[in-house]
Amino acid sequence: MRGSRSTQQTTGLTVNSLVVFTQTDISTGSDISLNTGTGQITLAANKTYRVLGQVPNIIASGANIRPSFCWYNETSSAYVGSAASYYQPSDAAGFAAGGGLSELILTTTQSTVISYRILSSGSSITGLGGNSDFGLTGSYPWFDIEVISGYSPLLNGTSGSSGTSGSSGSSGSSGSSGSSGSSGTSGTSGLTFTILNNVATRLVTANGTSGQANAESTLTYDGVSFRMLASSGDEGGELFLNKPVTNTSIDTGVTIDVYQNKLRFFESGGSARGGYIDMTGLENGVATNLAPYRYLYVTRLNTTQTIPSGNWANTDIIFNNQVVSRGISYNTSNGRATLVPGVYRISAQLAWSAGATYLIQYSCYDSNNNQLGPTVEQIQPTSGSNNVSSGDLDFIYVVSSTIDVKIRTTSTTNALSGEYIRTDLNTSMIIQQIG
């Protein structure tokens, strides 16, 4: 691979800074890759490489600028190979330096990253390459790296020096299809490949022109997230999923997109059958459960609930039979259900056996006996009271942090110990998460 810069480098010019090669001039195989954003070069494992690099000239401010450049092994954190050192013409130094190339022979045992760095500067460097005292052509930093040992299509196998595609074969460097032949890389039918708008993290798509591809500015992948950045007016990113070949009634396919504040998914053909989620209606911190399928159904079974003495005021109601539950735990010993954050519908019914006319009231409470729901009153038909009540508890409650809830009589309940909660009628509690 040969790479270089096409413009002067004017930033990152202190000691240990990288010479940033911004373009690949020619490359064969996949053993060598260049990061054009940082100038770092990655070498494949188990190869031996010859590495050359040079900064042909510099721009500096001040006197006695004594820059030197050297290859740096990023993987082992060490300078390697020979340095190229320079003096200014006006520098009255007592020594000498030959300048020239920085050269390195490197054998890798693992994937290895190298870079060409400023080893020393002496004073202020303001530019690498582009010295107007000389012609600008060829004045910018460059490197040349070759695989000289280990597997190489130019050295081994059928493409080796003596193979049919070797340097002396019909497809070799001097053959009709070789690099110098009529169909070679430098021949009339040779292949060149260009990526237009080449910027790091952009994904490449075909553009219909042979030897070209386009790096899409609205389609990127940074190693963590895939991003679709196209947007226009009310429309944001969009993804299309083709329909199955068989056993489907979907028209054309399914589109997922962002429209105004909505995340939509719908059929791309026909009448755009589908749905959406309004992001403004959801909780911060990704706290809205879009599939709140939690529920609980408990009853009183076999044994009635009684009290040993006194009255029923401030007494927890115990449903001792858990009929069905998903995602909501219930303790049949103390009558408490545990609710995680969400929106719930809570309902309860109590069937009493009362020997006299009593005021019986109950509601839903938390474990600290704070009342959460409305008060429900039950009145015997023969009480002579003008009050009318269904006797059913039914309300919606928003849970912001995990709590235990229970059904409990109020402080005004005056039923005595002779009364009890029946099992043969509908004594039950139902909790459903609805949001």
Image (tube, rainbow, N blue to C red):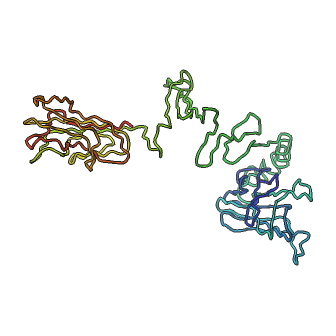
Kindly tell me whether residue 33 is visible in this rendering.
no
Identify which residue is drawn at 86% across, 56% down: 130
* Visible residue check, residue 203: yes
In the rendered view, tell whether residue 419 sits above or below residue 15: above
Q: How many marks?
A: 0
> In this image, 8 relative to 306: left or right?
right
Residue closest to the far bottom: 94
Q: Quadrant of the C terminus?
A: top left
Image check: 77 left or right of 344?
right
User: In this view, which residue lies farthest toward the top?
Assistant: 270
The percent coordinates of residue 105 (x first, y second) are 75, 65
Q: For residue 91, what is the image quadrant?
A: bottom right
Residue 99, how many percent across, how many down? 86, 67
Residue 120 appears in which quarter of the rendering? bottom right
Compared across the picture, whether 23 is left or right of 405 comes to: right
Q: Is 341 left, or right, of 88 in this rendering?
A: left
| Image location of residue 384, percent across then percent down | 11, 29
The correct choice, above or below, for 310 with respect to 244 in the image is: below
Relative to the observer, which residue lies in front, 306 or 372? 372
Q: Residue at x 74, y 43 (%)?
A: 197
Residue drawn where x is 78% and y is 48% of the image: 165
| Foreground of the two, 313 or 396 | 313
